[in-house]
Image (cartoon, grey):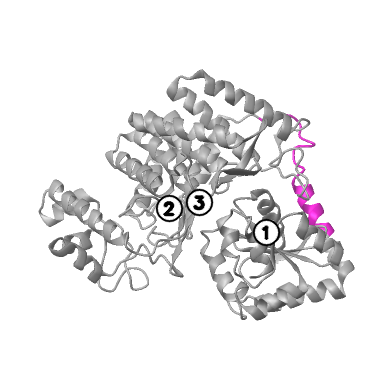
Amino acid sequence: MSTYTNRLAKETSPYLLQHAHNPVDWYPWGEEALAKAKSEQKPILVSIGYAACHWCHVMEKESFEDVATAELMNELFVNIKIDREERPDLDHIYMDAVQAMSGSGGWPLNVFLTPETKPFFGGTYFPPVRAFNRSSWKEVLSGVAEAYRERRTEVEEQADQLTNHLIQANGFGLQAGGIVSFSVDAAKETYQNLMKNADKVNGGFGKAPKFPQTFSIRFLLHHFYYTDNQDALTQACLSLDKMIYGGIYDQIGGGFARYSTDDEWLAPHFEKMLYDNALILDALCEAYQATGNELYKKIIRQTAAFMEREWLSPEGGFYSALDADSEGEEGKFYVWSKEEVKQVLGEDADLFCEFFDISERGNWEHKNILRINVPIQPFALLKGRKVEEVNAILERGAVLLMNQRSTRVRPQLDDKILLSWNALAVGSYCRMFAALGDEVFLERAVKTMEFLLNQFRAGHMFCHTYKNGEARQPAFLDDYAYLIQSLILLQEVSSDAGYLQTARELTELVIREFGEEETGFFFYTHANQQDVILRKKEIYDGAVPS
């Protein structure tokens, strides 16, 4: 058993536990590793990823499981593994550093630090041999170690400069000349800029890879509500419709994958995240309220059913994610050959396959991802059959394929429970109740909120992550922000003023522990956070709201 395995026996992160068998002498982020780097004057390698990350698995298999590579890493560096979802504060800092150095970022994120934890070099995925115009991982390791050994003063100066750059970039607002109010003109400009980037054919915004961008969709829905601009509504609904009909939506089991690798929403990156599904539900609820489209009501219910089936814990919280891979292959759990479908569905197979774009040659890597090219009403018309008849065949086929799929090796579950993502889910359930009126949605919102308020408390503060009956890691700004938001939403739909009082108390705590009084901005980490080189201020939406 390796020393890393012994260290990680106490960890709860599924991502860190995935690396327990590596020959790399991994440490979790903490005093032991940082003290070792200082005492031995070794550079630190920080490798950041998450349990559902496909390319994290690839690099692990190619490099971190290779004994010769591991020996090189162990000899030259103090190696630290970080779950980006447990320590988003560290991920934000070192992602900014890599983006400043290279102009791009992503996961796995591999960053080299001085013993004082200042970054001086980094990147994302590195192949085991030189490829894709990238140096091999071994070349990077040797080159970085040589630079640190032979030109240490230069490396430390570079680390200081980069750290100062990060600090200066974080210093906005200090010379601000007062608060600028949001205006109608700013809203119009935002709308115009969004529409310039909008895909008017396939929905969404920009080119592949395509993310749902639910903040943009909801902005368009709100813009329509206040201005009656039909183009805004059309683009918002086109985006939702194309995602619903595409492979990014699981046509068999419900739920949305993280993003699409193509412009048409066909081939997803198959991992599924709690926050994505919560945020898409918010957009679907508002789209249903704006249009009354029954399709949105159907997808809302299917997505909620998916979340509860796959992620709802016995205690009432939601787990974090489902992996992209199973049996070491991306998407294997979700794709089909036409022959498999015919064996399961029998005489219904031909119509089912035609509707969901299933062919002998396949639509993705010789297999088929289920998607809808023609919606059910025009499809039934083309086939000369009643919509109800076609719908019955499709629903029956989906149940049969779901049963068959359940016999496959399942993608790994990331079973940590995060305060921030669960608060987003509570907000979604409040919106679902407001939009559809189903009491079960309100009941779920109440039960999950009770779980969060009871299990994540640590004195007067809250924790960020929970697993195996234990809450860990001081909560971050977004944990509190989303929790406050969901408490306000829950008060609105339940009329229980107690939620509003709790929201007020938490807001006062946030102002006290996270606020920067002279600027009015808020730090991402609380006032007593000691193990970061700077307290970042986040002002841009990323995968989750700023």
Q: Amino acid at mark 1?
A: Gln
Q: Which residue is mark 3?
A: 415
- In terms of depth relative to the viewer, which is nearer, 213 or 329? 329
The range drawn in magenta is 160-180
Q: Which residue is mark 2?
A: 199
Q: Is residue 164 magenta?
A: yes
Q: Nearer the viewer, mark 3 or mark 1?
A: 3
Is 106 situated left or right of 114 in this image?
Answer: left
- In terms of depth relative to the viewer, which is nearer, 73 or 55? 73
Q: Amino acid at mark 2?
A: Asp
Q: Quadrant of the C terminus?
A: top right
465 vs 397: above or below: above
Locate residue 332: give its quadrant: bottom left
Q: Quadrant of the N terminus?
A: bottom right
CA–CA distance between discs 3 and 1? 30 Å
- At x 64% / y 55%, what residue is drawn? 10
- In terms of depth relative to the viewer, which is nearer, 195 or 282? 282
Q: Which comes before the other along the chain, label 2 or label 1?
A: 1
- Horizontal and vertical percent for residue 242? 35, 51
- Horizontal and vertical percent for residue 501? 58, 21
- Horizontal and vertical percent for residue 88? 64, 49
Q: Which residue is mark 1?
A: 99
CA–CA distance between discs 2 and 3? 36 Å
Q: Amino acid at mark 3?
A: Asp
